[in-house]
Image: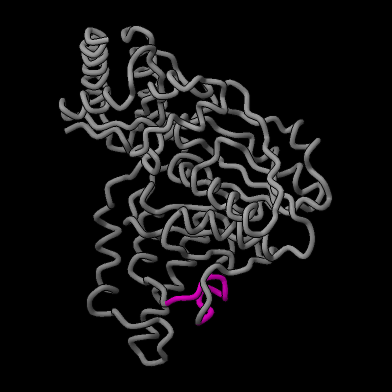
Amino acid sequence: MIYLDFAATSPVNVEAIRAATPYLTTDFANPSSTHSSGRRAKAALNDARERVAKLTSAHSSEVIFTASGTEAINLALSGISLAQPAGRRIISSPTEHQASLAALNFLHQFHGFQIDWLEVDKFGVVSPDQLETLLRADTTLVSLMCVNNETGTIQPVNEVASICASLNVPFHTDAVQAAGWMSLGFNNPAISALSLSGHKFGAPKGTGALLLSRDIACEPLIHGGNQESGNRSGTENVAWCVAFAEALSLLPDVEQEGSRISKMRDWFTTTVLADVPGSSLTGHATDRHPAIASFVIEGIHGASLLSELDRMNIQISSGSACSSEHEESSHVLKAMGYDDNTAQSAIRISLGHTTSMDELEATAAALQRAVTDLSLYR
């Protein structure tokens, strides 16, 4: 089997599971308990928090462990927005992940927030100039993903963050796809909050974190025993927090690995565009995630192509795994100007740290065969 859907999920790092195992077995105690077993669990939780903080240039008090990237995003959007004393305006983009779009819709429907949308160009990139025209002193929050999960397009996050900081408007970035591939430095004072998901970089599913600046108020979504400094109640999953920190620490150097993988991605992109009739690259050609290549293929239904490749034991995606089971065409591509039929032809190949050139060569050849076969039945 050739697996090229790492943007959907990655295999769990064995070392992360090994590090977590004691807190599922011998040191299983509740970290809020005051006996010696509880203190050992608490120490492991604190150590995991310190490690994540060091690896992301954050302070340990700014690390909030969650059960997913989706929860981290929801806590950032709803928590920060509902905690602000004034203003009911949020700025975001139409190409965000469904976790963000659904949270924004919730805030609009049930709390009366006005959502101002940044337009994207044909590459899916927002305009900082437009942000300046929309941004006001009473803007509650600006939220923009670091890198798009479907197309791989990188947004001008640092520039957007600086513009927000000029008016003291909180800024959140969904960095779920960035971890392991781009710098996650939280030492930029213009970034108020940053969301992460562990299963994208070798931690188990059900792990995530929100990095939240110490000077930003946040209304918790889950109320109870005031764990996570009052930001997220509920007994902490010590084992998975340890696994999250361990997986993050084991990631290779982002610059060296990003350069290595992007060369492989570029070879694959060039080959597909040359050999697969009707294929076009989506997203920005250069300012893109080093491991994501996404295409639309004229006259081919993406779901049919996925099924054909799956029959050949090659696993890729048609876009976001969170919405791929639905027949609706990609909201990301439609926002970029693609029509429904073209958007439904989309496929995404996402590489991992273990992907080989042999796998890419086999996939490129299989993709050409599959498109040719499907074209015969049009």
> Is 69 covered by the magenta stretch?
no
Q: In this view, does 233 lie above or below 202?
A: below
Q: Do we see residue 132 in this rendering?
A: yes
Report the coloring of the rendering. Answer: one colour
- Which residue lies most toward the bottom here? 35
- In x, y percent, where is residue 33? 40, 88
Determine whether, in the image, residue 151 is placed left or right of residue 90: left
Residue at the spot x=51%, y=24% of the render? 283
Q: Position of residue 229 (x, y in %)?
A: 56, 75
- Seen as rendered, the residue at the extreme front is 109
Please report the bounds of the magenta region as a residue range. 225-234
**Residue 230 drawn in magenta:** yes
- Picture layout, residue 27 above or below residue 334: below
Residue 110 falls in image quadrant: bottom right
Quadrant of residue 377 within the rendered picture: top left
Magenta region's main secondary structure? loop
Q: Is residue 302 left or right of residue 110?
A: left
The answer to whether 108 is drawn above or below residue 304 in the figure is below
Residue lying at 55% horizontally and 40% vertically, measured from the top left:
96
Q: How many marks?
A: 0
How far from the left and from the top, in percent, is residue 339? 50, 19
For residue 283, side relative to residue 357 (left or right): right
Q: Quadrant of the C terminus?
A: top left
Q: Which residue is drawn at 82% across and 46% down?
A: 136
Whether residue 187 is visible? no
For the residue pair 163 and 116, the one nearer the viewer reads as 116
Q: Which residue is drawn at 62% across and 53% down?
A: 109
Q: How far across and how far down the image is residue 168, in percent?
A: 79, 53
Question: Does 297 sit left or right of 82 as displayed?
Answer: left
- Quarter of the image with the N terminus is top left
